[in-house]
Amino acid sequence: MAQFENPILPGSHPDPSVCRAGSDYYLVTSTFEYFPGLPIYHSRDLVHWRLLGHVLDRPSQLPLQGVRASGGLYAPTIRYHDGVFYVVCTLVDGTTKSGNFVVTAADPAGEWSEPQWLPEADGFDPSLFFGDDGRAWWTGTREVPGGGPGQTEVWLREFDPVHRELIGDEHVLWTGALRDSVWLEAPHLYEVGGKYVLLCAEGGTDFEHSVVVATADEVTGPYRGSPLNPVLTHRHLGRDHPIAAAGHADLVLTQHGQWFAVLLATRPYGGYNYNLGRETFLVPVSWEAGGPVFSPGTGRVETRYDVPVLPAHPWPEVPETDDFDGPVLDPSWMFLRTPDEVFWSLADRPGHLRLRVRPESVTDLATPSLVVRRQQHQDFHASCVLEFDPARPGETAGMVLLQNDEHHVRLLLGSHREVTLVVRAGGQDTTLARTTVPGGAVRLCFEATGQDHRALVASGGGEWRPLGEPFDGRVLSTQAAGGFTGVHIGLLATSSGAPSGSWADFGSFTYRGLSPSRERSAAG
């Protein structure tokens, strides 16, 4: 039988949530400080996914200005009911707005509503449940008043989908599988076999992450934890296992009666380090005595499974090279926080992405002239073609491997045609190498084989040449940088705090995964 390979969404795609509308499946994930927010993916076979766009793609929907790294959008849930799609989510540590909200759309690829904020909804990680009796319910997570660090509880209130507000009494459903549970979160409710099933994450988002379950005869409880909890975890497999931190699951029932779960997990490499962040995996699920069995037969997330009993529906391959010849940016590109102004253009010079040189940089909690997309492979090639003539010292443009404002790598062309490679760790810059290039177009490149990273430079159509020695990519791992995101690869133009009227033109950007056996620097 044909098989699929995990992860189904590689790169930083944490906290997945999925729903089905007829024979179509839709999936959203967290995006934290990046704009647009909440990518929405579409599939017809649960294996092949295409990016439709983002749920929150208008500045009015998503005020991220000044949000800290790994603040912003946490743990969305998507549901479909009576012809309407709902997404609920939490905006954390917003400088102008924070809390839980709901947005709706008749077409998930179309325009989503402005957020309806619910100040009465405490905590984070909200979810919606539409029962067979026609009633709708909101679940959420909050810290236990007076509890210790990480002690949380899951609560429930009825949800009015017409007015998009909470009504009725509040009910505390569960405080976790163990007496000393920490970070019970990500609650999702289902109705299966006459029972109400509450699926949650527990144990934090790293090595001890897990999936736990409780069931009840009534939606308001009481809920009883399964004696088999955790129903999924990898913490007993050790830190050398190729898949770690499995948890934060959501279930979906296919039109042919098969159950599957989407969940997050990580793929450490170079020791217990994961630069790609938390990725989205798919596992089969069966039911025994009213409870879910994840990955029957092994009880762990595998790299390969038999495909679902659904007609295969691959989408066209995404091109490796973006020539910037469309009317708008490809939806894979994002910005760091919500832009207050338009600093990019595909029309000023057709076939190029023009970025205005502005004072903001990636070291600031701001929105620099920067576009980014996810790193999705442990071994990768990323390169760009750049034309840039800085008007004064301090004006630079080029490429960035971005983990956050305090941990990233910059490969930038500046005044006197000098290309500089800088690693920033713990908020401190270290210059690794410099070189000069002749006038005209320059090509900049990052390549990685595992945690062995290097920068390369070429002039015009000339040969690639290394810039400095290889450097250790573990500076970009979550273990070094903290937070909840993976590495994003970006194109940047900055004047380092000074006013500027310059611009940088990027003629193309190429990204591809490299197999471990493939000869490095196969770049063209």
Image (cartoon, grey):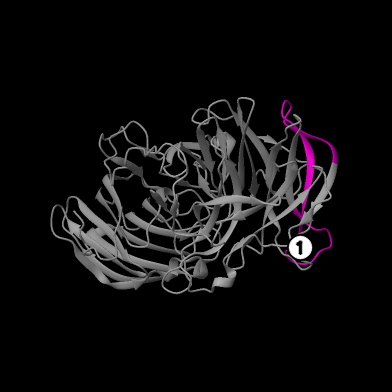
Q: Residues within 10 Å of mark 1 (few under 14, many from 20)?
A: some
Q: Is residue 456 magenta?
A: no
Tell me: residue 22, above or below residue 211.
Answer: above
Residues 239 and 404: in front is: 239
Residue type, numbered disc 1: Gln
Q: Is residue 16 visible?
A: yes
Query: How many numbered discs, if any?
Result: 1
The percent position of residue 381, horizontal first and vertical second, equals: 29, 58
The percent position of residue 288, horizontal first and vertical second, equals: 66, 52
Q: Is residue 57 visible?
A: no
> Label 1's element?
loop
Residues 66 and 384: in front is: 384
Residues 519 and 23: in front is: 23
Q: Which residues are magenta?
A: 142-169
The residue most toward the left is: 462
Residues 454 and 163: in front is: 163
Tell me: residue 113, above or below residue 495.
Answer: above
Tell me: residue 146, above or below residue 170.
Answer: below
User: Could you tell me which residue is drawn at 79 percent across and 42 percent down?
Assistant: 219
User: Could you tell me which residue is drawn at 76 percent across and 66 percent down?
Assistant: 178
* Left or right, 300 with reference to 160: left
* Left or right, 221 with reference to 500: right
The percent position of residue 79, horizontal first and vertical second, equals: 62, 36
* Left or right, 306 with reference to 159: left
User: Could you tell me which residue is drawn at 51 percent across and 37 percent down?
Assistant: 25
Q: Which residue is mark 1?
A: 151
The percent position of residue 154, horizontal first and vertical second, equals: 76, 52
* Left or right, 109 with reference to 376: right
Q: Is residue 155 magenta?
A: yes
